[in-house]
Every structure is written in C-alpha cells, then in structure tokens.
Image (cartoon, helix red, strand yellow):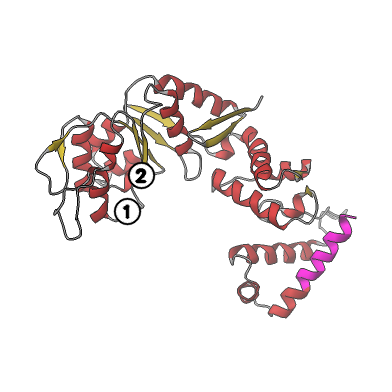
Amino acid sequence: MIEDHVFLGMPAVIASEPMRRLMAMVERVARSSATVLITGESGSGKELVARAVHQYSARAHRPWVDLSCAALPENLIESELFGYDKGAFSGADSNKPGLFELAHQGTIFLDEIGELDPKMQVKMLRVLDGVPYYRLGGTKKVAVDVRVVAATNQDLEDAVAGGRFRGDLYHRLSQISLCVPPLRGRVEDIAPLARHFLAQQDPALRFSESALAALEAHSWPGNIRELRNVVTKAAVLVRHDLIGPGDLPFSIAPELDPPAANGHSPASLDGMERRMIFEALEATGGHQQKAAARLGISRRTLSRKLKLYETERAGASL
C-alpha cells in the first residue's frame, strides 16, 4: 500500500514499513510541545519529517519558518534569527524582527543545526529555555512562544565529545529524537518515489521492470535527492516512452555481459570500456572534452564511440 501525503506543499510518497513507523511516531510527537531533533543522511527527507511535525501539531495554522544554519555566514545568522533595531549597525535603517518573532506561536525549523558557531549555541540555549532576548542593538526584550524542530546529518554526540557542540544544547534540542532511515534502508519506497518523480517530468513515460530493479539495487548515497536527479535526467534524455536500464547512469545500471563457458565474458573489455566512458561523462557533467582528457583519449574518439553506442541502443529498441 502506497500512502500519498502533502506536508506544507511538499509531497510525500510512503510505502516502506520503516517510513510508516516513523510517520506514526511523528503524529504522536507532534501533539506535544517538545523540541524535536531529526537526524539522518543528507537528502533522506529530514525537512519533510519536520514539516509533518508542524502539520500534525496544534500549531498547524500558525507560522512555519525555516532556516538552514549553514546557508548564512556567522555575522548574519544572529540578526536573521533574533532581528535588529534601527541603528544597530551600518545599513540598519529600520527595525527588523527576527525569524523567532516571525514564528511566534508556530514552528521554526533549523536545518543543519550542527553548523551553529559557539556564540550562537549559547544564545540558542537561552531562547530554548524560554529566556527573553534582545534584538541586535535593541533595548527591549522579546519573548516568543515557538516550537523548535532542528535537523542535522552530523553525529552531534560525537561533536559534543569533540568539543564542537555544547552538550547542554544537544540535550535541550533532543527532547525527542527522530531518525530518518536512508533510502537504501527502505527499498520499498524507491519504485513509488521514482514513478512519482517521473510523473512530475512527463506522465507519458514509464519505467521497465528491469529499470526499477536496477534502481532498487543501487545504494543511493545521495538518497532521495540523488534519485530525483537520476529520474529527471532519464526523463529529459530518453527518446522513447519506456525507460530501461540502458537509459540510467552506468553507476546505477551497469551493462553486464553474459559469461562464456570458461566464466569470462567475451565482451568484457567492450563492456568495461563503455562503463568507463559513461562514468567519465557523469564525473564531468557530460563535458566531452573533459571526459576525453580524463580517459586519455581524443575527443574525436570519444564522439565516435558515443555515436556507436547510440546506434546500438536505437537498434535494440526497434
């Protein structure tokens, strides 16, 4: 059974048991006011889970504010989070409320929380403890009612042990901890997600069963973000309505030649050469001159081989 949800405009396609269990936990956690720390690999869907926490909560009709703590330099993140008063610094021509004020009575999502510098960690801890704070250059304290949901792909316990993250802040953030499993740990989600991303690109396209099997066999180090990129690329470049293994990157669906009686593939050298060519093209973003240099061949030779592969593929699809 495949469940389709939309959390604050972000669609979710859930088929695997690990994700069903996680989302059931999210619904229970959302009813509380506890701070939530979401962990998981990059691209695994931590923001989706954070949005679900807000949508299932009693604050669902209140503001949702999000910020990547790694997206701003250290000298700007304090003014973004806590705001500033007119004249606080050069260019501060008017008062500006911070994101915590904008999220009053709602939820603030702090992605990549492990990137906060030590000074900001201290101020964040005080805000989480409910202590009113000053805007930059301000003289009047600001009190807010905000539910904090944070996320990280780092091991914060290791960061605490290494002195890179405050232990008291970590324990305050992780009142409730939710771990998003990597895509390779929820294989049942891969095919539904791939079909979903493909339909977004072109509803007329579909995957062959062998292509879906190849997608499910891949380890997906980049998780859902990598899967979306692979599907998008296949949808854009395919020349027919059915996407087969040959339309996927060679890192996902390498062409394996059938072994001969002696256990060796008669075309193993050709297959290896083809695989190396496509891996070089992937590594260089499709730039043929750079790929040729990487392979130690001329661009003319590379172009000739690509035309040969295209002819073989066209013949196979007839």
**Residue at figure coordinates x 32%, y 31% from the top left:** 174
Evaluate whether residue 266 shows in this view. Answer: no
Q: As drawn, is 22 to the left or to the right of 213? A: left
Confirm whether the magenta stretch covers residue 312.
Answer: yes
Report, in whole angstroms, how far the alpha carbon at label 2 lies from the one at label 1: 9 Å
The quarter in which the C terminus is drawn is bottom right
Task: Estimate the x, y position of residue 301 in percent, counting from the top left.
Answer: 74, 78
Horizontal arrangement in the rendering, residue 12 relative to residue 267 (left or right): left
Please give the residue where the numbered disc 2 appears in the rendered image. 67
- Marks 2,1: beta carbons within 8 A: yes
Task: Report whether 181 appears left or right of 175.
Answer: right
Q: Residue at x 62, y 29 (%)?
A: 15
Residue 300 part of the magenta-drawn span: no
Circle 1 crowding by C-alpha within 10 Å: few under 14, some 14–19, many from 20: few
User: At 35% across and 20% down in the image, what residue appears?
Assistant: 32
* Residue range corresponding to the magenta coloring: 305-318
Q: Amino acid at mark 1?
A: Leu
Regarding residue 214, the answer to whether it shows in the image is: yes
In this rendering, the answer to whether 220 lies above or below 307 is: above
Tag on residue 115?
Answer: none
Residue type at mark 2 is Leu
- Give the left or right position of residue 205, taking residue 27 as reference: right
For this rendering, which residue is in front, 310 or 59? 59
What kind of secondary structure does the magenta stretch mostly adopt? helix
The residue carrying mark 1 is 72
Where's residue 134, x and y in %?
14, 41
Query: Which residue occupies the foreground of this view, 306 or 85?
Result: 85
Identify the secondary structure beneath mark 1: loop
On screen, 28 above or below 47? above
For residue 276, which quarter of the picture? bottom right
Q: Quadrant of residue 89?
A: bottom left
